[in-house]
Amino acid sequence: MIRAGMLKLGAGMLGELLSADRGHRGPRVPCGNGHQAEFISYRDKVIDTVLGPVTLNRAWYHCAECGHGLAPRDAELGVAGTSLSPGLTAMNDKAAAAGPFAGAASMLEDLAGVRLTVKRVERAAEASGAAHAAQARERSALITGRKLVPLPPRHDLDMLYGVIDGTGVPMTARETAGRDGKGDDGRARTREVKLAVFFNQHSLDQDGYPVRDRASSSYIASFETASVFADLVKAEGIRRGADHVRQLTFIGDGAAWIWNLVTGKFPEATQIVDLYHAREHLHSLARSLEFMLLDHYSEWLQARLEDLDYGYIDGIEAAVREYPLQGARKTEVDKELGYFLNNAPRMRYRWFRQCGLFVGSGVVEAGCKNIVGQRLKQAGMHWTTDGADAIIALRCREASSQWEAICNTSHTQTRPA
């Protein structure tokens, strides 16, 4: 009761404070489309805030040429086209990004005393996420076009990593219509979202393994094609200092689209296939030969794992070629072996480790699970592409470090004269 009373009192004070300036800016104001809008009257608007509903009485203008009205005071307060205050919008974004919309509405009521319908929580969060994603795309285009110059990286920045992967998101039938899938019926039920994370490294631990710098991660994601996503990754790389670091490294699972992206946008970067994925493929290769290896299976696999750790791909190929195969089995083995032959320069693990580099993509694997999986792959969930893209944009913003979140806001970047 005390809390409810204090919130009501605060809402009343806030309403009086905001109404002190009712937004009258003369008999005419620009409508935004090259015309002049005329003052009509003062009109009320109810705004939901962190203190509760507040009634704002402000000047209303109408443009006869465009046929629409506007209130300059709404734009000044950040509530043009919406009835949620910026503060409540930020709270709603956090709650909706953390869990299902119904739970977010309940959380806002329980913890903040603010009542919003589930649909309103959903629409507000998706609108915020869409706006954030649009700003990110606009900023990326300006950076890659060299029209927006990011602040230079800190002077001691030495090693920068980019780790890229993709994961499926369950979609509505309309979103996957006409798409091929992996199911028995050949229909797609998911769409791939591409995820990239950038982070820095300055040190090694006592065992000589690299240590990711604390609070240095920034995440970007998109449902766009690889070519469009490549431009987003390029812009983020520039922003993070890819043009200035001594060592730029990209890590991926071996998918061709990842290496095409990196080679095209960052030809100077070191490319590394994630060691865990390489080991998975080696186990699969060994299983294909198991019927010939028999009792020597474990011994043969262990020897090949040692070859892989040393980056000795020629040794793996020679060991496989000792067993002549034909037909479907040969096709299967050649496919697995091709994974290693095509990625041999990216599998020099002993050399990479001697240089103090990461050889695993665990940070982006965790991102796929934490950013996408935990929120968008819960039981019964089916998304539209726009809705999923918006929520993922909010979660990427939350997952990025505080400093990265500040740098990624539109108000902290300046365009060159």
Image (spheres, rainbow, N blue to C red):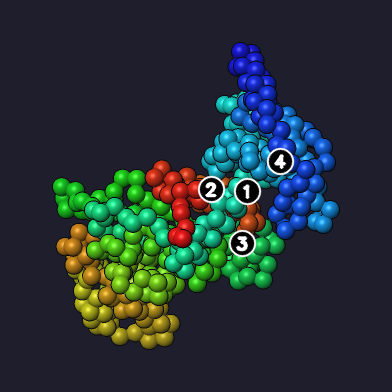
As drawn, the label of residue 266 is none
What kind of element bears circle 3?
loop
- Residue drawn at (73%, 29%), measured in percent from left and top? 55
Circle nearer the viewer, 2 or 3: 2
The answer for how far apart the CA atoms under marks 3 and 1 are is: 22 Å
Contact, mark 4 vs mark 3 (Cβ under 8 Å): no
> Which residue corresponds to mark 3?
189
Q: Name the residue type under label 4.
A: Arg
As drawn, the label of residue 25 is 4
Circle nearer the viewer, 4 or 3: 4
> Which residue corresponds to mark 1?
126
Q: Does residue 290 lie above or below 397 as drawn? A: below
The answer for how far apart the CA atoms under marks 4 and 2 are is: 35 Å
Q: Does residue 374 lie above or below 110 as drawn? A: below
Q: What is the x, y in percent for residue 87?
A: 58, 35
Circle 2 residues within 10 Å: few <14, some 14–19, many ≥20? many
> Which residue corresponds to mark 2?
394
Circle nearer the viewer, 1 or 4: 4
Q: What is the x, y in percent for residue 44?
A: 78, 33
Task: Count numbered badges in the picture.
Answer: 4
Q: Quadrant of residue 91?
A: top right
Q: Earlier in the sequence, mark 4 or mark 3?
A: 4
Q: Earlier in the sequence, mark 1 or mark 4?
A: 4
The answer for how far apart the CA atoms under marks 4 and 3 are is: 53 Å
What kind of element bears circle 2?
helix
Toward the viewer: 217 or 65?
65
What kind of element bears circle 1?
helix
Q: What is the x, y in percent for residue 395?
A: 51, 47
Q: Earlier in the sequence, mark 4 or mark 2?
A: 4
* Residue 178 horizontal side relative to residue 329, left or right: right
